[in-house]
Image (cartoon, grey):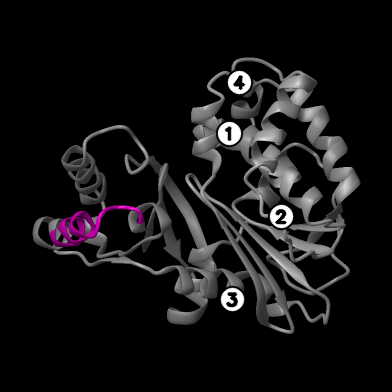
């Protein structure tokens, strides 16, 4: 078992062979307005349910943003109270795991983007021939947009509301961009696009059972607009009864991704359910 302690969710995975399976999602207090000691107590309480499974627990950007003394306090608290080891992985390791999860089976000499949108941050990696040639870390994620635009999930979205959020995101993007025609879009997006019946086509860029489909950027934008303008959050949640709260961030994530793909001139998107955890398992548990 592996547990991913994120900014807005705690994701629990069982491990089969090389592919981790998401079996539980719990709310994470890391990005909340609670005081630090309440946050640490709530995290420990949530993790205690799984202590007898002796899981591997990793935390990423949200935990890295804690003050160093609070990071230490969290690690020691989990070890003392649960007899478990929690590892806060650094940015370089997180990037390495993500790269392993996504691009390992794609063979091309063209620049490829890896887009990893989190609750409080977004990482944009550009790779060529397996080497990182560009990296952008944005202090904006799904949670940032939800906090900035608290009415985003109240009803279907109007065009001016979508444009306002896109403008907000564009102001945070770097002026100089390492452009890429192909992009991996991670974080359960393959499942999401299947549920919403995006016009996916067979992946002719690579042979990888984890990434069977691709979608052109124009088709992606057209379907995004249809969903944002016509499908309510309640209707989205009905499509995912096992984890309905995942859909609370779907609109914010969609708009953020579309804005980034436009800015970096992406033509083809490879939706992916793989993430840092998949790369971690391939490198350490395989």
Is residue 18 visible from the viewing direction of this image? no
Residue at the image position 15 percent from the left and 57 percent from the top? 73
CB under 8 Å between discs 2 and 1: no
Q: Are marks 1 and 4 in contact (CB under 8 Å)?
A: no
Q: Residue 234: give its label.
A: 4
Identify the main secondary structure in magenta.
helix
Give how far apart the Cα atoms at labels 2 and 3 are.
28 Å
Q: CA distance from mark 2 to mark 1?
A: 31 Å
User: Residue 235 appears at what percent x and percent y?
Assistant: 66, 22
Tell me which residue sits at (61%, 20%) in the image: 234
Q: Residue at x 79, y 64 (%)?
A: 179
- Front in this rendered view, residue 211 or 176: 176
Residue labelled with disc 2? 175
Residue occupied by mark 3: 100
Return the mark for residue 5.
none
In the picture of the structure, the residue carrying the numbered disc 1 is 247
Measured from the top left, where is residue 8 in percent x and y? 42, 42
Magenta stretch encompasses residue 37: no
Q: Position of residue 86 (x, y in %)?
A: 26, 64
For label 2, the crowd category at 10 Å Cα-Cα, with few meaning under 14, some 14 to 19 and many 20 or more, is few
């Amino acid at each position: 078992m592996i547990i991913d302690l994120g900014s807005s969710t705690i994701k629990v995975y069982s491990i089969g062979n090389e592919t981790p399976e998401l079996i539980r999602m719990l709310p994470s207090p890391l990005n909340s307005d609670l005081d630090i000691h309440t946050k640490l107590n709530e995290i420990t309480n949530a993790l205690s349910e799984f202590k007898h499974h002796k899981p591997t627990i990793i935390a990423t950007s949200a935990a890295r943003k804690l003050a160093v003394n609070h990071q230490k306090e969290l690690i020691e608290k989990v070890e003392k109270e649960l007899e478990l080891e929690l590892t806060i992985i650094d940015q370089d390791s997180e990037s390495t795991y993500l790269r392993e999860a996504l691009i390992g089976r794609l063979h091309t000499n063209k620049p490829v983007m890896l887009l990893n949108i989190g609750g409080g941050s977004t990482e944009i990696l550009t790779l060529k021939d397996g080497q990182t040639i560009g990296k952008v870390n944005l202090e904006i994620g799904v949670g940032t947009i939800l906090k900035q635009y608290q009415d985003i999930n109240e009803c279907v979205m109007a065009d001016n509301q979508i444009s306002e959020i896109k403008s907000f995101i564009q102001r945070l993007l770097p002026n100089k961009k390492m452009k890429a025609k192909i992009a991996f879009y991670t974080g359960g997006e393959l499942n999401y696009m299947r549920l919403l019946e995006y016009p996916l086509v067979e992946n002719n860029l690579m042979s990888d059972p984890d990434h069977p489909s691709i979608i052109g950027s124009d088709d992606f934008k057209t379907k995004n607009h249809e969903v944002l303008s016509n499908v309510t959050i309640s209707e989205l949640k009905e499509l995912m009864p096992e984890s309905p709260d995942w859909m609370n961030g779907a609109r914010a994530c969609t708009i953020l991704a579309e804005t980034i793909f436009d800015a970096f001139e992406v033509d083809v998107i490879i939706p992916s359910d793989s993430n840092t955890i998949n790369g971690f398992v391939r490198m350490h548990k395989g």
